[in-house]
Image (cartoon, rainbow, N blue to C red):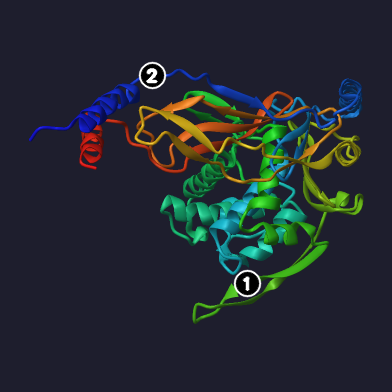
Amino acid sequence: MPIGNRNWKSAGALTALVLMLFTTVSVPEMTVNAGNSYAASGSAAATADERKNETSLTNELYARAAVLMDAENGRILFSKNGDEVLPMASTTKIMTCVLALETGNPEDVLPVSSYAARQPKVHMGVQKGEHYRMEDLLYGLMLESYNDVAVVIAEYYGSKAAGLSMDCSLHTEEESRKAVLTFARKMNEKAKEIGCENTFFITPNGLDAELETDGTQKQHSCTATDLAAIMRYCAFMSPQKETFLTITRTASRQFCSLKKAQDGTFETGTRTVSAANHNAFLQMMDGMLSGKTGFTGKAGYCYVGALTKGEKSFTIALLACGWPNNRTWKWHDARLLLEYGLEAFDQRSLQQPDLPKTLLVENGQLAEVSLNCPKKEIRMLLSRGDQTDVRVSLPGQLTAPVEAGEQVGTVSYLVNGALYEQLPVTAAFGVPKITYCYCLKRLLALVLL
């Protein structure tokens, strides 16, 4: 059937349309800087003052390594040798405590092995064959820092993971050591999960120890940065954080041993234990939530703590903060760090910039695609000298095919030039690529109009 002039003209126009659809147009990538310094005026002077304050603080601290961390997001606000690997003594026990809470049940009854009973001071003096409730032991662990209690806890929960008898009183010394090392491996796994890459637990109580692993001799150690992060997890993030805080804030606790009745149940035993909290810093500053002291010959005095006051939450870590006759140095350093945090930093929000609603799509069956980006308020503690930027990075156009939900750009939040958080910009729907089949269908649809 002949085609009229009008249809021939339409066909010619469609041919031109097809050629146009396959023509490439280059559009440059778009990068938008949507932020500036928190201190919009006088920022150079503010930055100089901040550096002066940080230098002064570094010089005033006794600790060889110290960190002040924003507990809300884990950002390091101050660091003195924060990534130096050092022994951390009984601050270790915060991980032992939180892992026991997450692994077991406070009502679990834990038996004592001869291996646990032989642990050195400071110890509760547990005896082989005794039994204690797990929750009671945690008070002895965190308030009095009992080394034997840490081993009782680690051996019991490590036995389950190692496939050993849960009646630890029947263990040989080799089995006891295996169970405790298994628990230490769980501690290391939890540390990695939290993001601690420079922590290596060998003991659950923090006593100085070395272990050969992968051909390398390693010591029981961590960094001030990792230790502050572990406290952040224990006090602010763990599903057992409330119980952890209740235990570590308790002034004193009295509990009894348990004895096994003939029917297999447990009843109150003959021994009574009184535990008193040795974290004196709980009463030294308003807002202190938790803390743990530590000391060994290699580690010196150590401290880790958490504080919340108003909108500000911090964790601190101090390592190698003096040796005997310097017992109070850790309190001096803890106060300096926390007072610096409270005075120098304020809670601020970084606003998300306005994004283009659409992007052009080259060679697509639709000319453009809508964009999505998660709406999120970015809050953090900032000092007057902190420089913040919010940057939007998007291509000038996309090339089909585009998948629904495909990431096409980013919104980046930077503090002092370092990436703090990045949000994805995604395509709201899919855009298929133009094909000859698609063009033919369009051509036929228009011809038959």
Residue identifier under label 1: 258
Residue 341 is situated, as x and y percent measured from the top left of the image, at 85, 39
Residue identifier under label 2: 24
Front residue of 269/47: it is 47
Mark toward the start of the polypeptide (1 vs 2)? 2
Q: Which residue is drawn at 70% across and 46% down?
A: 232
Can residue 364 be seen here? The reply is yes
Q: Quadrant of residue 199?
A: top right
Q: Residue at x 23, y 29 (%)?
A: 11
Can residue 207 be seen here? The reply is no
Locate the N terminus and report the quarter of the image it occupies.
top left
- Figure check: 116 above or below 425: below
Q: Residue at x 34, y 26 (%)?
A: 21
Instruction: Calculate the distance from the C-alpha at mark 1 to the C-alpha at mark 2.
Output: 81 Å
Direction front: furthest residue: 5
Front residue of 223/89: it is 223
